[in-house]
Amino acid sequence: MTDRIIALTALGRDRPGLVADVSGAVTDLGGNIVHVEQSSIYGLFSMVMLIEPADLPPGLDLYRFAYELSLRGRDVGVDVKAEVVEREAAMRSKDVRVVTIVGSDKPGVMAAITRTIADARANIERMHHVAQGDLMAFEMWIDVRGADFEQLRHAIRRTCERVGVDAVIQPHSMFRTTKRLVVFDMDSTIVDGEVINELARAAGVEAHVASITERAMRGEMDFREALRERVKMLKGLTVQDLEAVAGSLRLTPGAEDLVRALKEMGFRLALISGGFTFFTDRLKRELGFDYTFANRLVIRDGVVTGEVEGDVIDMHRKGEILEELAAREGLKRDEVVAVGDGANDQIMIRNAGLGIAFNAKEILKRAASGSLSRENLKGILYALGATEYDLKR
């Protein structure tokens, strides 16, 4: 194995057979292709190859080989640049992360994010749009080797907040597009709002309950304590009251389409909620979730007693359930996605291979792989490797 190889770049108008012509020229000259990337956009062909000498004819050294490749390129109708480079430099190991940007298209978004990456001394290896129109999404592969990744992650998030888009950052690995299980929180994630606040409105204690809910979601109050205190104030509600609240609940915009798309893509789906089974069971029937977990309100003679049955599903229990589900499905951690909005979702988010903070509190954004705002829920599909073309088929 030589310590030098050829780096070839080719540009031209695309046509059928062009890849075969370029690769055939390499083989005819005695080269072996060890890496290739090629694309065609709006009829413009581009290709990058790394080539090692395999069976060069007598008198043809690497530099002459590179020159002959450029001549062959002209023969097949593309501009070829071929140069001799150090193998170690060209094929060095990288630490590649995939950054998915989602939001409304506007001038300056790409410039701001790419400048942030450059300032962190990370290198953009590849970039392409995966969706255009009302919801824009583009994907960047960045080599963060030599950069402070945590600082870069927070810098990208701050830049995205400034320009009004969302970002999800994850390692580039085989598991990125082979995720198998997606776990959602219910309140303010699949359901647009907090169910317990709607129950409190029916019980006439909305303001008090809402303030406790907000403190709990920000991580300022123990969730178990917060839940039991709020449920006490629901004492006296009837099953008819619960049915009325269930009938009035609205799904987060895009949630139904997202669930349908994930099911069609073959995902198993779960709800793990700090809310109540009365509502998660309904969503399971209506949307087709495979699993649902939530707290069980004690109801006697059709009336809420103000208690919950059994252990409360808090932050720690959510994380445990995710791991139990992965084991039941025979999945590795990297094959699981978790989506939530509050402090109660922190461990669940950390225990997943990809954790997404949705319309979330700051405490959860810091723990997650990335965050999506309320109008960009569909961005989960793009973070999982789907493209606009895939979703239109």
Image (cartoon, rainbow, N blue to C red):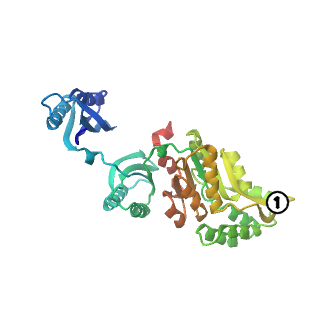
**Residue at the spot of label 1:** 299
Residue at (80%, 57%) from the top-left corner? 240
Quick one: which residue is furthest to the left in this view? Answer: 59
Quick one: which residue is furthest to the front in this view? Answer: 1
User: In the rendering, at what x and y percent does residue 44 appear?
Assistant: 29, 37
Q: Quadrant of residue 47?
A: top left
Q: Is residue 323 left or right of residue 242?
A: left
In depth, the one of 12 and 317 nearer the eye is 317
User: In the rendering, at what x and y percent does residue 383 appear?
Assistant: 48, 49
Secondary structure state at the residue bearing disc 1:
strand
Q: Quadrant of residue 75?
A: top left
* Kind of residue at badge 1: Ile
Residue at (40%, 49%) from the top-left corner? 139
Quick one: which residue is furthest to the right in this view? Answer: 301
Tell me if I can see residue 250 in this picture: no
Q: Is residue 102 left or right of residue 72?
A: right
Tell me: residue 12, above or below residue 221.
above
